[in-house]
Image (tube, rainbow, N blue to C red):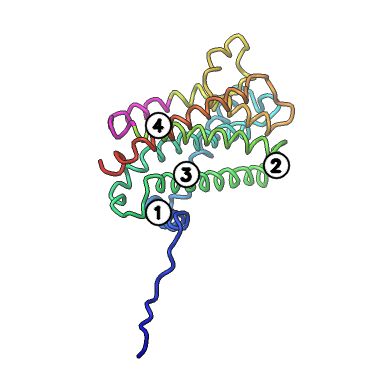
Amino acid sequence: MKKSVIERRPTRSSLQIMRDTVYALFIRELRTRFGGSRLGYFWAIAEPAGQAAVLTTIFSLMGRTSLSGVEIPVLMLVGLVPFKLFTKLISQLSNAVLSNKGLMAYRQVEPIDPIITRLLIELATMAIVFVTLMFSMYWFLGYKVTPVSLPGVLLAIFLLVALAVGIALILCVLFEYFPDMSKVVGVIMTPMMIVSGVFFSASMVPTQYWGLLDWNPAFHCLELIRESYFYGYDPGFSSLEFVVKVVIIADFIGMLLFVSYRTKLVSS
């Protein structure tokens, strides 16, 4: 009498399930965001390049070709691309769960999965954009685009990303209870671009007015990036300690709210 053999599929760990889920969501997001338009990736590169070109033209008309010893196009992009990453992360991550609410019916999908997916997409997109633009300015215009301290640049960008994630997690919960708040956040992001040092550096601001900008951790992050990117640039404005403290507080509150209201995020 033959014994029946029951083949059992090997069980997957929670990390393997998350990996497969994030991969599937990653492909889905790419097709949704860029698949419908052949110019999707082009605009991702053309937008910051166009903004930097406009700002360079304005400064050129004012008789300025460099600021703090740095060519204006390079100075603008070093501030513009990281800040766009910051705002994109807040916008995309805060709406990640709400946009994928229908997928929460599948038990493999956790609320954190679409957030991780969009985080990876934004990081990859902005990395490609930044490298492409910098290489183009080096190859075609002859600008010096290599950073003085790459670890310092990466640390400052990491803090900026961590700050955006913390803010996004907080907003992700708040949007569930106050949907119209997303419009308010959209309005706030426009003046934030002005007061975060995207179009200017701390070296251009008189020291007696630094107190008007000192509260903004995003400005500190951009200045930390510039200090690590450009040789001899150190106006003395940025504070690494302040940024780390704000990031820890924002991420702690964000993760606490996200975990506490996980059931609400899935069921509502």
Report the front residue among 204 and 96: 96
Question: From mark 1 to mark 2, how far is it between C-alphas?
Answer: 40 Å
Question: From mark 2 to mark 4, how far is it between C-alphas?
Answer: 43 Å
Number of numbered discs: 4
Residue 143 visible in the shown view: no
Magenta stretch encompasses residue 184: yes
- Which residue is label 1 attached to? 25
Residue shown at the point (53%, 29%) measured from the top left: 247
Question: From mark 3 to mark 2, how far is it between C-alphas?
Answer: 33 Å
Residue shown at the point (40%, 72%) measured from the top left: 8
Report the front residue among 209 and 63: 209
Q: Residues within 10 Å of mark 3 (few under 14, many from 20)?
A: many
Q: What stretch is highlighted in magenta?
A: 174-190
Q: Which of marks 2 and 4 is in front?
A: 4
Query: Mark 4 falls on what kind of element?
Result: helix
- Which residue is label 3 attached to? 119
Magenta stretch encompasses residue 39: no
The extreme bottom residue here reads 1
